[in-house]
Amino acid sequence: MKYVENKAEEVKIAYIGGGSRGWAWGLMSDLAAVDDMSGTVYLYDIDFDAAKKNEVIGNGIKDADNCKAVWEYKAVSDIEAALTGADFVIISILPGTFDEMESDVHLPEKYGIYQSVGDTAGAGGILRALRTIPMFEEIAESIKKYCPDAWVINYTNPMTMCVKTLYRVFPQIKAFGCCHEVFGTQKLLVTALEEMRGLENVKREDIKVNVVGVNHFTWLTKAQYRNIDIFPVYREFAEKYKDTGYTRDVDENWMNRFFSCSEKVKIDLFLRYGSIAAAGDRHLAEFCPGDWYLKDPETVEKWGFALTPVSWRKEDLKKRLEKSQRLYSGEERFELKETGEEGVQQIRALLGLRDLVTNVNIPNYGQIPNLPMGAVVETNAAFRANSLSPVYAGNLPDEIYPLISRVCGEQERVVDAALKRDLDGVFAAFVTDPNIYLSVKDARAMFDEMINNTKEYLKMYF
Amino acid sequence: MKYVENKAEEVKIAYIGGGSRGWAWGLMSDLAAVDDMSGTVYLYDIDFDAAKKNEVIGNGIKDADNCKAVWEYKAVSDIEAALTGADFVIISILPGTFDEMESDVHLPEKYGIYQSVGDTAGAGGILRALRTIPMFEEIAESIKKYCPDAWVINYTNPMTMCVKTLYRVFPQIKAFGCCHEVFGTQKLLVTALEEMRGLENVKREDIKVNVVGVNHFTWLTKAQYRNIDIFPVYREFAEKYKDTGYTRDVDENWMNRFFSCSEKVKIDLFLRYGSIAAAGDRHLAEFCPGDWYLKDPETVEKWGFALTPVSWRKEDLKKRLEKSQRLYSGEERFELKETGEEGVQQIRALLGLRDLVTNVNIPNYGQIPNLPMGAVVETNAAFRANSLSPVYAGNLPDEIYPLISRVCGEQERVVDAALKRDLDGVFAAFVTDPNIYLSVKDARAMFDEMINNTKEYLKMYF
Amino acid sequence: MKYVENKAEEVKIAYIGGGSRGWAWGLMSDLAAVDDMSGTVYLYDIDFDAAKKNEVIGNGIKDADNCKAVWEYKAVSDIEAALTGADFVIISILPGTFDEMESDVHLPEKYGIYQSVGDTAGAGGILRALRTIPMFEEIAESIKKYCPDAWVINYTNPMTMCVKTLYRVFPQIKAFGCCHEVFGTQKLLVTALEEMRGLENVKREDIKVNVVGVNHFTWLTKAQYRNIDIFPVYREFAEKYKDTGYTRDVDENWMNRFFSCSEKVKIDLFLRYGSIAAAGDRHLAEFCPGDWYLKDPETVEKWGFALTPVSWRKEDLKKRLEKSQRLYSGEERFELKETGEEGVQQIRALLGLRDLVTNVNIPNYGQIPNLPMGAVVETNAAFRANSLSPVYAGNLPDEIYPLISRVCGEQERVVDAALKRDLDGVFAAFVTDPNIYLSVKDARAMFDEMINNTKEYLKMYF
Amino acid sequence: MKYVENKAEEVKIAYIGGGSRGWAWGLMSDLAAVDDMSGTVYLYDIDFDAAKKNEVIGNGIKDADNCKAVWEYKAVSDIEAALTGADFVIISILPGTFDEMESDVHLPEKYGIYQSVGDTAGAGGILRALRTIPMFEEIAESIKKYCPDAWVINYTNPMTMCVKTLYRVFPQIKAFGCCHEVFGTQKLLVTALEEMRGLENVKREDIKVNVVGVNHFTWLTKAQYRNIDIFPVYREFAEKYKDTGYTRDVDENWMNRFFSCSEKVKIDLFLRYGSIAAAGDRHLAEFCPGDWYLKDPETVEKWGFALTPVSWRKEDLKKRLEKSQRLYSGEERFELKETGEEGVQQIRALLGLRDLVTNVNIPNYGQIPNLPMGAVVETNAAFRANSLSPVYAGNLPDEIYPLISRVCGEQERVVDAALKRDLDGVFAAFVTDPNIYLSVKDARAMFDEMINNTKEYLKMYF
């Protein structure tokens, strides 16, 4: 890497999971949109062909009209080549296939357990963690070996447990986890300002929030726009929409229906607990006692959100594979469109090209004093040249402490037990999950069945 | 108070709830059993006649053969008279009557919620707290006014919330909560040493334990007898009895059946979580997810413990009233018998007559670093002349953190909301209780019904 | 205050000490240099005429060529008028006159104690604190009464003790202390990058530092420019200049000579303690054991810095008074020139017009875990709309902990005792000061003499 | 080890420094005085002959009239034999000889630095630490290898730095440091109770104190006897004796003169800082700014304590060697006399034969929240079967925080640098010592001279 005037050049990014048909393209778009960085992105994926296709797609971008920076893309077949000399490592992988995810999400239905996402928390989240943690152990070891000074940005779920694994294996790692769920809530607050106060042209980034909690179960304890405290505004908004829910655009498309959300969960949690729950309702619901929002499909419907079936994901993947082929062959032109993700801005800040304060997932150094030190939490942090420092967020408010502390502790415990390949230990945490309301015996039967169903990826535990 | 040689004389104890037919007699026995203290016990009770009877009973003790110390008992009809000049205040009251407790314990059964005790946690514990907290506010205010330097010993349940209220109202109070549940577990460990190692004559007090948690959901992270680490011994014991349970004496008496316990819950928790759950199974079960041990009466039976019906308590009270009459009239002779409680030893230690390290309920100064500062927790503490200092207990082990942190936070929150007379706030905590696994709507219906049923004692909330 | 598009208008700033001939003019310049804010500055000063003159001077600025924003200036004769409705309060006062400061700085010379500044630490700093603390009590009470939601920016020395007093009197105050000494060190690091690495055009703001310590005894534990860790660069620089010192421009002007500094103290501390001392040498020296740099004038000279005589300040004041008169009368034109201070940028950030991470003086919430909670410390903090949150700075490195913890504790103690009007308590802290190396008896004699000499301003202590 | 009824038998104690003519005999006496333990003491010393002599002396004790327990003594020539299988390890060594100590204590006089003891703090303490730390590294490594579960009791000075070294090298070590200085202060408080209140027969152990600080600079924040708060009593006592000092028996013996102390330092510190300084004046003085009590011999005399010359120690050693010979030959009979030390009671408590709360030196787990975590501090702790847990002591009072935090940090830093063999790092801490008030240059000259003078024992640093 080097700096030429106000630009960083020859930046090397290693992308683990670089064959992705989604996140990878988003990154390509975002990298092309800023004019003060250039370099090479090494695409590493266990599906080398996928990486290879993305190499071709990525290298085609420089010809786009509004491409502001030239990045070279290189598919590599071993992780050493990807990591050696890397300034940044991006991790965005799918642990296993959608068949395993289908088991994670839908097998529990047999036991009366419903899940809206199933990739972060609950039965599905933990099983996914069991597959993911050993992969992240390997990645962390490789980073320690090949690029210990690189900044590591994780996008993979279950976010908290992935980041925790990186730090457990290589405590000096410069890693953090990135998630856009808070942004969605900021947008909702923009809407509330528009609806209730008639404001216009409010930018998402100008909603300044204090974030506490764990990923996908994050909460805002302050939200401010200029001189406006948004809490009373949001309270009016919540009271107005608590029964009907709020949906900007009704999308009748079959595909999108499964991501629909009417913010009723979010509103309900706010009205009861006084802090602003700040993730999609599908995520929030999974961290709450199962009887609240996920008791059965009728309950889910009543709360106005959707259970995303993995069949949808499979269908969606097909579409993305087709699109990949079209992009690769040149049949379809790559459209540059900023994603709204902050990864590229974080990279710029770490390169010293700007300052940035935003929310991330990192170990607790005391930014949330009433959660355990070292537990991975989500709060704001200051990104500056080669530096990431948590911003003091304060205690979890008493009202939400019982909801969050338990899931924080549960996730820490799953990682700990999984690293020891101690499935009984994992189960002991599993059975405390808020969305697993079964007798211990039934929970064990379900756990064993879920493991058996995905055992292809769990050999290291036996 | 004064000291004459090695004795403390003219000690003044105020007993709030001094009309009790149970605890009060135990205290009388224990006070008569030590020879280095004497003084006066002021009996205050809203049932003045009951206090008056106990005055007579207490003053009769000095004639008993083995009475080692003379204590005078005086019933007083106002709290000012009881507290003024007191060196010690003992609080042991029944908030409301057994009719209210009947509602607390049994009304939830209509919603499918079963409770084995119903006085500490869960629906019953919280409703009881709603009645108790305003009483403790008054008591704390009176102590602040009449005897701010007195040591205050609470025996009333819900323990944690009672002690918390005292400190919230009068932060300088010298109060602590006392509970014998840990002693029961120490006795079980004695049994394990006898059964598995053939030891004899092991005394309960010689089992040295490290206590963490909240009252009635206390756990041991260390247990040592001389040079023996009891954990592996208890593991053998647990493996042996995990299916059958352990019951020393089968008591077919109808009355006792409702307190029976085969230690299966305790053993199950130990085998899953690695620390020793240290309270009666009836209490432990109520702090766990409802599906585990309290799903329905069959589940309870399977786990070998009993749901104590309040009808039993009413029956038992009748017997105790009869006994009270007999003791009062002289028909029955008061039998001096040490209770095994440590209250009197704690008093001696606070008077500087001995040192004592034992478990108590006090605010967290850091003795459990991963629970919130200020939350009322149960750990060991050192009692010395006019001083009570927590002993460092260490973090909750990761395995049990998710189980305990949530209930600790829930109880803190109930007190906070109850002090503000904020029933919505109380409900928001109520619905997070592990043994309330209902939809929010059903939970609210149950909550409202429970409140309505006991509204006589809840007028201050409306 | 209101927002019109991207501008904040009708912002009200209260300036306590608004008759100043220095800081006030700097603020006027800086306010005129940004184009997205406008409003009114209320000038309050015990010297009302001075405030009145500044009103005229300030209101003349809008005619300057490069004036980007129109601010109105109004002198007011009572603090209520200044504070009522204020969005921001700036405090920059001289406690007492230069006659008192002359006693603070020079009287100790009689006892062999030399001071290079005498306004922050040491004998002079403490005496100044005794005068200042009662004034800040009044200010804090007034803010509590008239504008409790205003942001309060303090520039007055002794910084730490002033900020502490504000928080002690009104714990909910939104106050922070601002100081430019770290900027000076950042500039020196720019120089080191230029000298040792040949870099050009490096901006002060682009040197990203991690700040720990107390005001004027602040240290950098990290310093980064883009991808360059500055510590090894600064080490080379320090080795090169440790004997000769580093002085960019030799200024033979009599007046400037007393502020000269050759960075030898700073370099010496870095080479011995491994962190970068980040304040002017004249300040740093006063926080170190007296024998190190301030033993006598010869020692001071050897270390290449100056003892600033108060006679110089008096002379300088005369010049500034003359200038004030010229500006007031229009004889001299007000020259707009940015000061390099960050106050105006902090105000913009608090108004939500930008984000800013910079160093401030606020109570310790855990940003420096090994200093006492609540002690006023200097670290980075994030300024965002109506929000100021400390950035986690980490422990003081072990090497400098002994140097800093003592002075941090000493200053906390002085405030505590002064608030109680307990001069014996103040003296007990005074005699632990690193630059007061006298027998207790001599120290007391000096202390009493210093108090007597400035008793006009210390009546409240008697 | 085994238990037979209420006795512990076959206890194995390893005594490192077992050739001692002082502490070793005290231990022999104390062991003989309790009737519920017996076993073997392995005497290991680099002076094997000395150990051998002590073996003979120790084995002769069983014939004494009042010997209650039979302990066997065995001199061993290698540390492995001493440690293997040990239940307890006692460390009480002299690092180097009195020649080195002579340099430690007296060489600084040439630079105007006087020391009253010179074994804990200041120039002498640090130089002694430099010799001792490498020895303790070896001891810690050996304990880790041969008896990792043994309890380790250190008596060696510099206490704090010795204990710190043990934990740095072997973090799981079960070690603590024992010191009787607090007992001396408890005795003084007994005297105050007698003098000012006419009490009689008060036992030292019944003065219950809350201890904070570092070894030899320990302070009491509470002192209670039964229902008497001793602070106001001690204040009267202090006011009475502040000018004359308090000396119970004037001892004109030449030898004792050098340990004399009139408590004037202790009283002065109490009257200024409000907490009770709780070590001998000779120790306390060395932790204070040099100008206070140790400026020169006249100052020392004025404060009524003595500079203990090493010539005295050499003379004393001669006498002890003669006594050793007489005891060994049988010419003199070993007199059993309890020492008042608590080591044997601590051993009994760790064996589960009693409970004990007393002061020890161990790492800070939060028992003193405003000192750094992990720093070795002195507070109370609870000794129970195989367990030692700190008792919460609370924050250092603000008044004494500046005095203690700096020396705590200084000692931590010396250990850290010495373990890295970094003499520049050691010097950087050395020059911050309160009793080294020299220019950096002079301090370095003195430091180098002191090192050179004792280089025989410091080879590992070069």
Image (spheres, coloured by chain):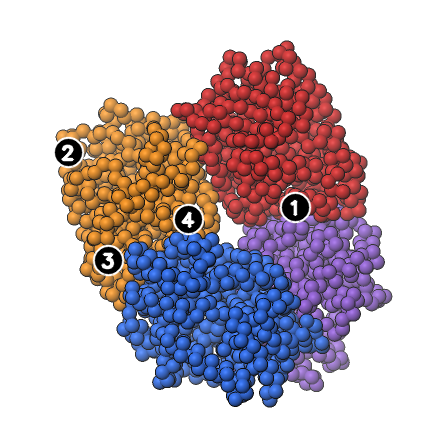
Chain colours: A red, B purple, C orange, D blue
Identified at 56% across, 48% down, the residue is: A373
Q: Amino acid at mark 1?
A: Asp
Residue that lies at the very extreme toward the right in this rendered image: B252
Q: Which mark is residue B355?
A: none
In the image, is A19 to the left or to the right of D45? right
**Along the line of sight, the residue nearer the viewer: D68 or D20:** D20
Q: Earlier in the sequence, mark 3 or mark 2?
A: 3
Q: Are marks 1 and 3 in contact (CB under 8 Å)?
A: no
Q: Earlier in the sequence, mark 4 or mark 3?
A: 3
Please identify the quarter of the rendering in which residue D403 is found: bottom left
Residue tagged by mark 3? Answer: C113
Residue tagged by mark 2? Answer: C326
Residue tagged by mark 1? Answer: A416
Q: Say whether residue B140 is visible.
A: no
Above-or-below relation of C62 to C83: above
Q: Amino acid at mark 4?
A: Pro
